[in-house]
């Protein structure tokens, strides 16, 4: 049976906006306002904001197989939290996977890095059960390419996805590669998280010409977080270690950047997480100068989970 749009939406999570198109449903991780703001900054930032990081179908079923059609992007399939397949849409757009017998949890992850949020249809065997997954908490992740999961190998290996899965969280992963503190990029969404995790700073280091400019944008963004989520648990992560942190930029060195951000976080009473303590300071844990690899993301997630579970 091909699932109706209503049934697909009942098992879809992580999107802040869904549009019904002639061919199917298109899912977004950002509001149109956010996409427009980032597009004005840079075209590629707008494209990354228009993606569907963190969007997934998450359900329990006795179905022994699943079929779906998506015209582009890389999808991942997890069964009972075990990755069993990866689908790369291109010349092939219709996909099939065996799920095995008995009841199981099925998690179909949408692409984390492509503007490819269109799902044309999903099919399960006739008579198969379909029960939306139930979560224990809600988390909103806001950040840059590290939050988006660049260089994690599998998208589900990113720190945000690892935290989401371990804490059984309904999450929105608003990670945008290349993003930084930008006050105009904030927007309210139809999602009411108990926990908010903000992780900018890595790109701010090279973006802003002065510490004053960084402070202005950081303060403006965090003021809106305070207004929208002041009664919630807000955690702000200072930038993680990187290879070139001794290289001076226009605003100063990397620790100057971290200090400005920390001061603005402290003014608003948010929880501060020292990014230097999340990923080991060794190249073995990094894919490049700034992005952890899958092993580095595992360390990042492990330590962040310990903090969020306290």
Image (cartoon, helix red, strand yellow):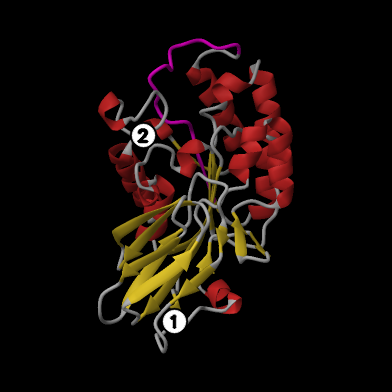
Between label 1 and label 2, give the one nearer the viewer. 1
* Residue 240 lies in the magenta-colored region: yes
| Residue ID at (69%, 45%) | 34
**Residue 117 or residue 143, whichever sits in front:** 117
Toward which corner of the image does residue 81 lie, by quadrant? bottom left
- The reply to whether the C-beta atoms of the residues labelled 1 and 2 are less than 8 Å apart is no
Residue 234 in the image, given as x and y percentages of width and height: 55, 49
Who comes first in sequence, dot 1 or dot 2?
1
Q: Residue at x 31, y 41 (%)?
A: 294
Residue 183 can be seen in this image: no
Residue 128 vertical placement versus 152 (above, below): below
- Name the mark on residue 34: none
SS under mark 1: loop
User: Is residue 7 at all visible to an observer of this figure?
Assistant: yes
Give the residues in magenta. 234-250
Q: Which residue is mark 2?
A: 292
As rendered, which of 85 and 211 lies closer to the eye? 85
Q: Quadrant of residue 150?
A: top left
Which residue corresponds to mark 1?
130
In the drawing, does residue 168 fall left or right of residue 72? left
Q: Residue at x 50, y 73 (%)?
A: 11
User: Please, is residue 199 above or below residue 156 in the view?
Assistant: above
What percent of the width, then of the height, locates residue 172?
54, 56
């Amino acid at each position: 049976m091909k699932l109706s749009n209503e049934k697909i939406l009942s098992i879809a999570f992580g999107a802040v906006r869904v549009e019904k198109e002639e061919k199917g449903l298109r899912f977004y991780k950002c509001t149109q306002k956010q996409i427009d703001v980032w597009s004005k900054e840079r075209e590629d930032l707008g494209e990354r904001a228009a993606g569907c990081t963190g969007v997934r179908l998450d359900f329990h079923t006795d179905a022994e197989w699943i079929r779906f059609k998506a015209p582009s992007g890389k999808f991942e399939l997890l069964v009972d939290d075990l990755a069993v397949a990866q689908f790369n849409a291109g010349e092939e757009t219709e996909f099939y996977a065996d799920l095995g017998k008995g009841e199981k949890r099925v998690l179909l992850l949408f692409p984390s890095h492509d503007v490819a949020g269109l799902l044309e249809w999903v099919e399960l065997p006739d008579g198969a059960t379909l029960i939306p997954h139930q979560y224990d908490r809600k988390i909103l992740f806001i950040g840059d390419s590290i939050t988006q999961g660049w260089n994690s190998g599998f998208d589900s290996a990113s720190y945000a996805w690892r935290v989401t899965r371990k804490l059984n969280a309904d999450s929105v992963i608003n990670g945008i590669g290349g993003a930084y503190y930008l006050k105009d990029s904030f927007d309210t969404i139809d999602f009411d998280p108990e926990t908010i995790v903000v992780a900018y700073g890595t790109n701010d280091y090279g973006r802003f010409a002065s510490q004053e400019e960084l402070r202005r944008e950081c303060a403006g963004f965090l003021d809106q977080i305070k207004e929208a989520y002041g009664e919630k648990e807000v955690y702000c992560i200072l930038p993680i270690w990187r290879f070139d942190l001794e290289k001076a930029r226009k605003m100063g060195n990397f620790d100057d950047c971290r200090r400005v951000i920390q001061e603005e976080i402290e003014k608003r009473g948010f929880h501060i997480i020292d990014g230097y303590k999340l990923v080991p300071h060794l190249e073995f844990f990094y894919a490049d100068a700034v992005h952890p690899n899958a092993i580095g993301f595992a360390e990042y997630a492990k330590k962040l989970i310990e903090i969020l579970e306290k």
